[in-house]
Image: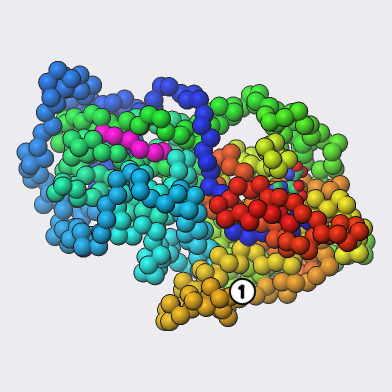
């Protein structure tokens, strides 16, 4: 039996891949004023070349200057040489030369910081740290879903005020415990809450710490623009700001590790694509140069680190023939994207005849949902948060998805617009009914049979797929116990509940916070999110995907899952048999196995003779209980 869901799943353990692009991609980040922009693909920013052409001045070659440095120690001009007369004229700018407020910030930070860690060598086992990172990010996204009016910054600020920041008052030079190369984040503020990049202001691309009275860079956020899929062994940063230059010059001198986070654009995500931040690992400033007022730095990736998940894809082959490909599209074009089957593990085969691929639920005659034309909304075009839209009203006055098609509602049931609504097909309240958008594939796992992963990075809160199958009743379930691998019991669970409870506490427990925390541990009486359709325990209905099903039937269980289930109604109004839609509970890097929580009750799964059945769990999560049932 494979019931419900909730929470997020294991962050990627980015697989080691053979470096497919030895050629490094060279980019320049300009942190002048408040934007980053790509200046050039060559070590020397084009803008400078243009300027040189204009002024006819000789150009000091950046690469040559580096070569010279091999003979003679590079002269890195002391920053003080650059009397910035322009400072006064400059607009207010977070990156500007330290103003008094920046100095205050600095002083504040200095007082706050209690410890500086270098490469976190003495930190607890990475599994513990990793679970902490994932839990906090899960909480962040849970809060975003629960309180969609809070911006990511406000959400992070709330967590900070509640003392939930993971590495608050700690600064890491080098690796941050629990964060792995290839981890992907949807919001800048996620970087802050786990201490990967502590600067909460979006424009502050370089984070730093004071060590031995020197300000050195600890992390850099670099705008890779639409470089999704490219390697960044070298990152070029140019800046006109003395403050930034000082940090990087000092880092060049002391040779400290700098974390590089690359902002990439995901084209296939949401309605208009989406920026994400990918952690590329540790780099060192290897070359510095200066051309008039522009400082240029080349950061080179430390060798021996994991490849970033994008590159793993290249190993597997993005297009063309995939290694281990045994079925090109198990859905036989029933889905908008082909669902291929890959086996690089053993000789086991999966064929299109193994089950009947369906994209719509199968309802027996006795529970055919009754059409409800009167429940359709009368909106013209796209629905909005308004009392006029019947569907929005049924969702508590809100459209439960944002412009990126990310779910911003939690618990209970979501009412999407449906066939009886007058709104257009691109109404924002039609997301999960539109089917699979990500390039999912079925792959052979080492110990759990088949599993599912995505060739795309999946932003948190994205719709993955529906759990499709045949609706059956309890009596029928009893008859199928010997073939119960693909049963999903509707409604006897609370989706994502523990995360949402904690998220709810974040906002509601202004007072007596500590007290309530104790209560939580004891299973105290904090508010439980109630399923408004009464689905919490509607009992008796199960989806069986053994004979008829879709890709969801291959999704395995994890004790620390990365998907959660959400009840959705759109084409009928029978709350006993909602659609079970699976959403991502966290940002999921490419090629990471997708999992949800089966919520089996140990000792209560019986065979046809009434004997207790047992099965080991091989999810590999840090908090795994060892038993599936
Ligand atoms: C819904 S199916 C998932 C797809 C299945 N792996 C397959 O090969 O078809 C559920 C079954 O997968 C296996 N499974 C899923 N998650 C597992 C886990 N964490 N550990 C061990 N086996 C698991 C169990 O045999 C379970 O009954």
Please state which of residues 161 and 392 is positioned toward the viewer in this rendering. 161
Label 1 Cα neighbours within 10 Å, binned few <14 / some 14-19 / many ≥20: some
**108 on left or right of 478:** left
Quadrant of the rendered image containing residue 223: top left
Quadrant of the rendered image containing residue 5: bottom right
**145 on left or right of 215:** right
Quick check: is the Cβ at mark 1 less than 8 Å away from ligand 1?
A: no
Residue, x 61% and y 74% (percent of image)? 529
Residue, x 53% and y 43% (percent of image)? 12
Rendered position, 205 above or below 166: above
The magenta span reads 280-285
Q: Which element carries disc 1, helix, strand or loop?
A: loop
Residue, x 65% and y 26% (percent of image)? 322
Is 281 in the magenta? Answer: yes
| Image coords of residue 66 (percent x, y) | 20, 23
In the rendered view of the protein, which quadrant contains the C terminus? bottom right
Quadrant of the rendered image containing residue 1: bottom right
Q: How is the protein colored in the picture?
A: rainbow
Please state which of residues 67 and 364 is positioned toward the viewer in this rendering. 67
Rendered position, 176 above or below 283: below
| Image coords of residue 213 (percent x, y) | 14, 49
Residue 382 seen in this snapshot = no
Q: Main secondary structure of the magenta part?
A: strand
**350 on left or right of 523:** right
Residue denoted by label 1: 529
Residue 282 seen in this snapshot = yes
Rendered position, 474 above or below 329: below
| Image coords of residue 493 (percent x, y) | 70, 66
| Image coords of residue 224 (percent x, y) | 40, 37
Is 346 in the magenta? Answer: no
């Amino acid at each position: 039996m494979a019931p419900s869901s909730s929470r997020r799943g294991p962050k990627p353990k980015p697989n080691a891949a053979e470096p497919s692009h030895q050629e490094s991609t060279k980019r320049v980040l300009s942190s002048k004023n408040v934007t980053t922009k790509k200046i050039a693909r060559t070590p020397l920013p084009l803008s400078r070349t243009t300027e040189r052409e204009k002024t006819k001045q000789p150009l000091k070659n950046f690469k040559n200057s580096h070569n010279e440095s091999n003979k003679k120690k590079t002269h890195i001009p002391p920053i003080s040489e650059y009397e910035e007369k322009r400072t006064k004229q400059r607009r207010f700018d977070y990156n500007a030369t330290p103003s008094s407020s920046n100095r205050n910030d600095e002083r504040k930070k200095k007082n706050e910081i209690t410890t500086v860690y270098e490469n976190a060598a003495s930190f607890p086992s990475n599994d513990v740290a990793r679970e902490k990172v994932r839990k906090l990010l899960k909480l962040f996204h849970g809060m975003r879903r629960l309180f969609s009016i809070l911006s990511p910054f406000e959400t992070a600020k709330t967590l900070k005020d509640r003392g939930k920041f993971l590495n608050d008052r700690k600064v890491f030079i080098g690796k941050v415990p629990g964060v792995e190369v290839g981890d992907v984040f949807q919001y800048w503020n996620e970087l802050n809450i786990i201490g990967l990049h502590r600067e909460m202001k979006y424009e502050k691309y370089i984070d730093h710490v004071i060590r031995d009275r020197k300000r050195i860079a600890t992390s850099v956020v670099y705008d890779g623009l639409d470089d999704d899929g490219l390697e960044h062994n070298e990152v070029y940063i140019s800046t006109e700001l003395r403050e930034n230059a000082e940090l990087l010059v000092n880092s060049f001198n002391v040779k400290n590790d700098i974390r590089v986070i690359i902002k990439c654009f995901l084209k296939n995500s949401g309605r208009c694509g989406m920026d994400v931040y990918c952690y590329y690992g540790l780099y060192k400033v290897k070359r510095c140069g200066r051309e008039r007022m522009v400082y240029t730095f080349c950061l080179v990736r430390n060798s021996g680190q994991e490849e970033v998940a994008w590159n793993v894809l290249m190993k597997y082959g993005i297009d063309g023939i995939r290694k281990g490909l045994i079925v090109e599209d198990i859905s036989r074009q029933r889905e908008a994207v082909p669902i291929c089957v890959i086996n690089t593990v053993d000789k086991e085969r999966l064929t299109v005849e193994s089950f009947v691929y369906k994209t719509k639920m199968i309802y027996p005659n006795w529970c055919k949902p009754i059409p409800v034309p009167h429940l359709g909304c009368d909106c013209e075009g796209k629905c909005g948060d308004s009392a006029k839209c019947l569907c929005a009203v049924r969702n508590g006055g809100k459209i439960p998805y944002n412009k990126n098609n990310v779910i911003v509602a939690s618990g209970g049931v979501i009412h999407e617009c449906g066939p009886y609504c007058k709104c257009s097909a691109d109404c924002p309240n039609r997301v999960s009914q539109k089917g699979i958008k990500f390039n999912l594939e079925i792959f052979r796992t080492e110990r759990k049979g088949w599993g599912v992963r995505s060739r795309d990075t999946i932003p948190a809160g994205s719709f993955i797929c529906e759990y499709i199958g045949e609706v059956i009743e309890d009596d029928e379930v009893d008859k199928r116990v010997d073939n119960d691998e693909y049963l999903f019991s509707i409604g006897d669970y609370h989706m994502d509940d523990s995360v949402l409870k904690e998220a709810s506490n974040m906002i509601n427990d202004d007072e007596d916070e500590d007290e309530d925390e104790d209560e939580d541990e004891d299973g105290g009486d904090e508010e439980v999110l109630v399923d408004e359709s009464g689905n919490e325990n509607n009992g008796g209905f199960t989806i069986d995907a053994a004979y008829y099903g879709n890709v969801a039937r291959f999704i395995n269980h994890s004790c620390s899952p990365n998907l959660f289930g959400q009840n959705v109604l759109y084409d009928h109004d029978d709350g006993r048999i909602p659609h079970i839609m699976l959403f991502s509970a966290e940002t999921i890097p490419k090629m990471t196995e997708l999992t949800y929580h089966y919520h089996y009750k140990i000792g209560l799964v019986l065979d046809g003779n009434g004997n207790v059945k047992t099965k080991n769990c091989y999810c590999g999560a840090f908090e795994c209980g060892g038993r599936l049932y």
